[in-house]
Amino acid sequence: MVLRLHSLSSRCAPLLLLATAGVVANVEKVIFNGPAPANIPLAKPSLADLNLYSFTPETSVIRTNLSRAFASDPEPRGTSAWLLLDRLVEGQVYEVRVCWAAIEPTSFTLDVHELDTVWGNPELIQSLASYASSRQTDPITDRQASEARRSSAKGRTASVLFLHVQAAADYFTDDVNLMAHPPPVLVDLILDPFLYNVVPRSLIPTAGYLVLVGVVTWFLARWISSTLQSVAAPPKRHAKKLD
């Protein structure tokens, strides 16, 4: 739907607010701190054997399709997907965002878990094992798994977390097939560290742009005000010269 705004008035302000809320609704996030480094176990199955997408400092954005389902008793928050947050920095504040299109109504739930929490929770480890076993061969995860195996050949210590994403279809239609089998949703998953643990690093360019626009607007407003004042000022009366 394309909205054509011919004029700005108080009547259209609520519509603009609703449109803004709609855009915000397409982003879900979770904020967390990097945990203390832990020994990555070498026992099988290892983390690399799970064949999960892995976030690292070099791979901070992942675009993929996530399966989804309507909320039910077995899956009250929808279909589960698992990812690995690897090589984090202890104490660093991070934000993981999931972004998706408005034409694919979906409700997302994001949680992060330490390794020991997952290993010690039968429900979580069953969900993780089920997702890992359903994973198909993927070039990205194959490459990441190969690198992980090489790096873990002698064992390693790293700050690692599991990211648990649950996607529930959030729409109603008279199409029986769509109600029975919701299609996967295309998402962008973004790992964003905070600068000085205060603001997401990805927002720095936007903040700089807003500051620049504010400064330019201020000088432009002063110039326009000065010009209008000079135009509106009454002409000076000159004394007549005496012969």
Image (spheres, rainbow, N blue to C red):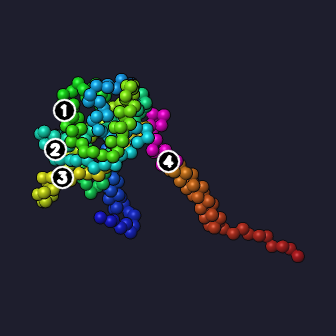
Report helix, strand or loop for mark 4. Answer: helix
User: Which of the image's four quarters has the N terminus?
Assistant: bottom left
Instruction: Report the residue at 26% width, 47% height from top.
Output: 66
The first of marks 4 and 3 along the sequence is 3
Cα–Cα span, label 2 and label 1: 18 Å
Span shown in magenta: 194-208
Report helix, strand or loop for mark 1. Answer: helix
Cα–Cα span, label 4 and label 2: 38 Å
Cα–Cα span, label 3 and label 2: 11 Å
Q: Is residue 8 left or right of residue 216?
A: left
The first of marks 1 and 3 along the sequence is 1
Report helix, strand or loop for mark 2. Answer: loop
Is the Cβ of the residue at disc 3 closer than 8 Å to that at disc 2?
no
Tell me the residue that label 2 is attached to.
71
Instruction: Report the residue at 13% width, 57% height from top.
Output: 177
In this view, the residue in front, 211 or 168, is: 168
Cα–Cα span, label 1 and label 3: 23 Å
